[in-house]
Amino acid sequence: MSRKTLAAAVSVGSNSLLIALKLVVGWMSGSVSILAEAIHSANDLVAALIALISVRIAERPPDAQHPYGHGKAEGISAAIEALLIVGAAIWIIVEAVGRILHPRPVENLPLGIAVMGVSALLNTVVSRYLFCVAREEDSPALEADAQHLATDVYTSLGVVGGLALTGVTGWYLVDPLVAIAVALLILHIGWNLTTKSVHHLMDTQLPSAEVSRIEHILNGETRIHSWHNLRTRKAGNTRHIDLHIVFRNDATLVEAHQVADELEKRIAAELAPAHVVIHVDPYDPEKEKANAESL
């Protein structure tokens, strides 16, 4: 089992435990904010399962039908997770509004506070672990899952605050109002994840810092006349890079091929894992002028 698969499995296990705890305590206490958190955790579980499946698919090697690999499975996972988050937020708001219109007492406050505190602690530990693995493995799916759980920490603490205020003031509307605040935060997360996953699926270019590293290698290569048409994208954790390099007309085909091959290897090593394709062009003043004007 790879580190990414293990991390996704840990997320599935922790979310399963939290769902059971929150559903039982939410039902016993009658707290809509705890029930909202249980639904949020159920959402997290579905997202974690999707992340687990997508990570396993993304790790498959390229094949005849998928010559560029299966890395975009992680981007699809992030997009689905974003939709689940938005749907859960809408459900929570509807339930909370109903509780505002028809208020009811919240019971077993100490138990509810204790469970939400445990939830915050467990999510803190798991999210930090996921962030660590996502950063080391460069996994969009795990990063989305980690961000989701990290935000759950703040929503859980918000519920704790709402329950505590309900106990102190006796004002039952605090509970559904906190649930609405949690839902709005979830909507914000869903929007951010949607934007990021769409960028990933739409082949947005690599970050400027990574593009600069490629340009630095190319600008330092004295055996080529120039370069142009640099294009970059990312699928899962694999970067796909292609560009054209221009040789003076006295360069032989063997020399040009050797330089291109060396540059492909250097760029791939600099931004590993990466797939680099370099096209070789002969020097043409008219094309050089056109390329310069297009920049």
Image (cartoon, helix red, strand yellow):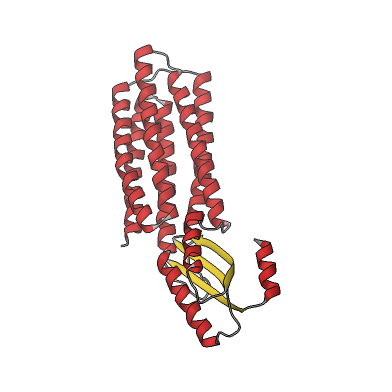
Quarter of the picture containing the C terminus is bottom right
| Residue drawn 29% across the image and 36% down it | 121
Q: Please say whether residue 196 is visible from this viewpoint.
A: yes
Residue 179 vs 211, above or below: the answer is above
Quarter of the picture containing the N terminus is bottom left
| Residue drawn 36% across the image and 48% down it | 131
**How many numbered marks are there?**
0
Report the front residue among 96 and 195.
195
Report the front residue among 8 and 275.
275
Q: Which residue lies furthest to the top in this view?
A: 169
Tell me if 204 is positioned left or right of 36 in this view. right
Residue 266 image position (x, y, % from top left):
43, 71
Q: Please say whether residue 67 is visible from this viewpoint.
A: no
Residue 22 vs 283, above or below: the answer is above
| Residue drawn 54% across the image and 63% down it | 232
Report the front residue among 242 and 116.
242
| Residue drawn 47% across the image and 57% down it | 74
